[in-house]
Image (cartoon, helix red, strand yellow):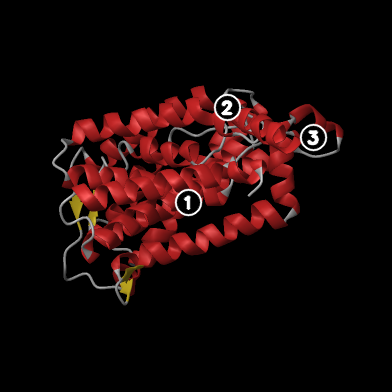
């Protein structure tokens, strides 16, 4: 194996994921149970549906911290439309997706056209959207009665054999994202936009349009996940997605995407999402309190960011190993 291949971020985090899996398998009761394994996959699936478009946005040099609140608003809108307005659940889900996309469009337009930093804007949107969700429901959760029947609920919470539907959606999203990033001109525009904005502009690209498109895609996915969560649980809660920003951003950063832009892969985010899901569920099975689970996820984010210079193919560790290899070759 070459030095460059050895220090690919995907290889490094795959090793970390394997080590975590073995550690939990040996120490966490019931970790290897089929139910636990499918729950890990379900959580990973929900995370990936938002983390993959967020990866594309980070590659383009922007970030969205309002994803959890956007998801929560979509969840309660779905429930309100079904229970209070009497809408068909499918139509309610489409409304939620449209609202999520509209939020993404608003975020992208303000960032690109008005020049507001995405970090600042989306912190504000995080509070605004969560507040709207609380206002719409008056702070209460909305249960969807069992007598309301629709194929949407089977679609949202069903499975294909033992495999949760969320896993299949996530795999489809992973395939599409990987294809876009590796095989399409739009993927090349993303890397160019985030890697060197001035050069991309001089090449005739329209970075602003690229960024707005990705903001919209991310918003649509937030709306979709919010609607699917309501359909799965038959519950619209204003606190849905609270803290989801941490898990999603953790998956993206652990997966190797650089917040400075121009770096990131779908494969890395997939492995990052698996690591976060295993950590959240495995620690709970070991009896760790929920607050400490959040601490551990935060530590993992910091560790991943700090290890970035070492894990790059041109990083210090790689250069040191390459130097040893060259010395042996010339000895």
Does residue 108 appear to the left or right of 224 in the view shown? right
Does residue 65 appear to the left or right of 181 in the view shown? left
Residue at x-position 45% and y-position 46%: 15
Quadrant of the image for the C terminus?
Answer: top right
Q: Earlier in the sequence, mark 2 or mark 1?
A: 1
Q: Position of residue 288 (x, y in %)?
A: 16, 37
Image disc number at residue 309: 2
Residue indicated by mark 3: 200
The Cα–Cα distance between marks 2 and 3, rounded to whole angstroms, is 25 Å
- At mark 1, the secondary structure is helix
Nearer mark to the viewer, of 2 and 3: 2
Q: Earlier in the sequence, mark 2 or mark 3?
A: 3
The residue carrying pointer 1 sits among few (fewer than 14), some (14 to 19) or many (20 or more) residues within 10 Å by Cα, namely: many
Residue at x-position 42% and y-position 37%: 250
Does residue 169 appear to the left or right of 287 in the view shown? right
Q: In the image, is residue 122 above or below residue 142?
A: above
Q: Position of residue 285 (x, y in %)?
A: 17, 47
- At mark 2, the secondary structure is helix
The Cα–Cα distance between marks 2 and 1, rounded to whole angstroms, is 21 Å
Residue at x-position 47% and y-position 43%: 13
How many numbered marks, from 0 up?
3
The Cα–Cα distance between marks 3 and 1, rounded to whole angstroms, is 28 Å
Residue 100 visible in the snapshot: no
- At mark 3, the secondary structure is helix
Residue indicated by mark 1: 270
Q: Earlier in the sequence, mark 3 or mark 1?
A: 3
Residue in front for this viewpoint, 156 or 78: 156
Residue at x-position 29% and y-position 66%: 157
Residue in front for this viewpoint, 208 or 282: 282
């Amino acid at each position: 194996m070459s030095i460059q291949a050895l220090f690919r971020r995907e290889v490094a985090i795959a090793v970390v994921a394997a080590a975590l899996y073995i550690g939990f398998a040996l120490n966490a009761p019931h970790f290897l149970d089929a139910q636990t394994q499918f729950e890990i996959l379900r959580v990973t699936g929900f995370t990936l549906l938002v983390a993959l478009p967020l990866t594309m946005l980070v590659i383009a040099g922007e970030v969205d911290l309002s994803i959890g609140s956007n998801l929560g608003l979509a969840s309660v809108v779905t429930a309100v439309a079904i229970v209070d307005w009497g809408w068909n659940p499918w139509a309610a889900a489409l409304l939620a997706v449209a609202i999520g996309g509209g939020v993404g469009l608003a975020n992208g337009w303000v960032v690109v056209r008005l020049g507001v930093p995405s970090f600042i804007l989306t912190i504000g949107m995080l509070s605004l959207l969560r507040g709207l969700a609380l206002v719409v429901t008056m702070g209460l959760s909305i249960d969807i009665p069992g007598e309301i029947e629709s194929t949407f609920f089977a679609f949202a919470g069903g499975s294909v054999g033992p495999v949760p539907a969320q896993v299949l959606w996530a795999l489809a999203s992973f395939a599409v994202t990987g294809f876009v990033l590796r095989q399409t001109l739009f993927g090349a525009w993303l890397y160019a936009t985030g890697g060197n904005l001035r050069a991309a502009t001089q090449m005739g690209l329209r970075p602003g349009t690229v960024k707005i498109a990705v903001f919209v895609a991310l918003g649509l996915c937030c709306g979709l996940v919010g609607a699917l969560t309501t359909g799965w649980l038959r519950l619209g809660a204003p606190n849905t997605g609270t803290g989801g920003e941490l898990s999603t951003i953790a998956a993206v950063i652990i997966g190797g995407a650089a917040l400075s832009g121009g770096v990131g892969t779908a494969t890395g985010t997939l492995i990052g999402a698996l690591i976060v899901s295993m950590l959240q569920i495995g620690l709970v099975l070991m009896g760790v309190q929920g607050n400490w689970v959040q601490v551990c996820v935060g530590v993992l984010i910091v560790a991943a960011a700090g290890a970035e210079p070492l894990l790059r193919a041109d990083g210090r560790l790689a250069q040191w190993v390459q130097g040893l290899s060259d010395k042996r070759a010339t000895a």
